[in-house]
Image: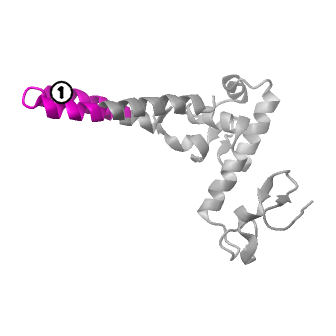
């Protein structure tokens, strides 16, 4: 089932996704799935497609696998993601496998094949087996700079130390708040 209407209306695809014609930029006769008009997919197309497909529970399963090293059994993933049944976990792992993000080992376990950053995961970086918001590193930088500025500048020039301290406190508070927001928005 494929419906096309006038500009600023909706296209209905078989998988029930709806996309605005203006967003697809169909005025130039381009294929709706290819943005360059020559039949080639661009990197942005791949990211947009992944961000549409990698959401909800599928993103939660992928997030759980990113946060844990090595291969994991279906039961481990089901328990860790708090899915109601192993078949639900298997369904989302199959979707991840079809996207090329997860692979099945010869022993039947699952492991991350490719790391991608879509949605809120773009603001996280992997350190060992943990996903840490980038703003946490900014907060640690501001905290260190704040301590050093008071230690080094307070005796010689208290007014400069105070002004620098205000700027660094602002950066620290902003970074801490953003870090907390990202932890709340992370798929868990």
Lateral position of residue 25 relative to residue 12, left or right: left
Task: Give the residue furthest to the right.
Answer: 1
| Quadrant hosting residue 4 | bottom right
> In the depicted view, which residue is nearer to us: 178 or 50?
178
Q: Which residue is mark 1?
A: 150
Q: Position of residue 185 (x, y in %)?
A: 59, 32
| Quadrant hosting residue 29 | bottom right
Position of residue 151 relative to residue 1, above or below, is above
The residue at the point 67 percent across, 38 percent down is 59
**Is 61 covered by the magenta stretch?**
no
> In the depicted view, which residue is nearer to us: 163 or 169?
163
Residues rendered magenta in the picture:
139-168
Question: For the stretch drawn in magenta, what is the main secondary structure?
Answer: helix
Q: Position of residue 80 (x, y in %)?
A: 66, 24
The residue at the point 9 percent across, 32 percent down is 157
**Is 141 covered by the magenta stretch?**
yes
Q: Position of residue 18 (x, y in %)?
A: 81, 54
Q: How many marks?
A: 1
Lateral position of residue 82 relative to residue 157, left or right: right
């Amino acid at each position: 089932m494929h419906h096309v209407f006038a500009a600023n209306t909706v296209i209905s695809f078989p998988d029930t996704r709806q996309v605005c014609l203006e967003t697809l930029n169909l005025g130039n006769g381009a294929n709706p799935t290819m943005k360059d008009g020559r039949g080639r997919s661009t990197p942005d197309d791949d990211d947009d497609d992944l961000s549409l497909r990698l959401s909800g529970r599928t993103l939660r399963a992928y997030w759980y696998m990113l946060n844990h090293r090595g291969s994991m059994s279906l039961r481990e993933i089901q328990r860790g993601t708090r899915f109601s049944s192993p078949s639900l976990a298997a369904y989302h792992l199959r979707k991840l496998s079809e996207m090329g993000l997860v692979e099945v080992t010869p022993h039947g376990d699952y492991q991350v094949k490719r790391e991608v950053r879509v949605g809120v995961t773009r603001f996280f970086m992997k350190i060992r087996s943990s996903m840490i918001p980038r703003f946490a590193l900014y907060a640690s930088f501001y905290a260190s700079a704040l301590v050093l500025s008071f230690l080094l500048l307070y005796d010689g020039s208290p007014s400069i130390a105070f002004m620098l301290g205000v700027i660094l406190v602002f950066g620290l508070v902003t970074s801490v708040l953003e870090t907390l927001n990202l932890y709340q928005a992370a798929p868990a």
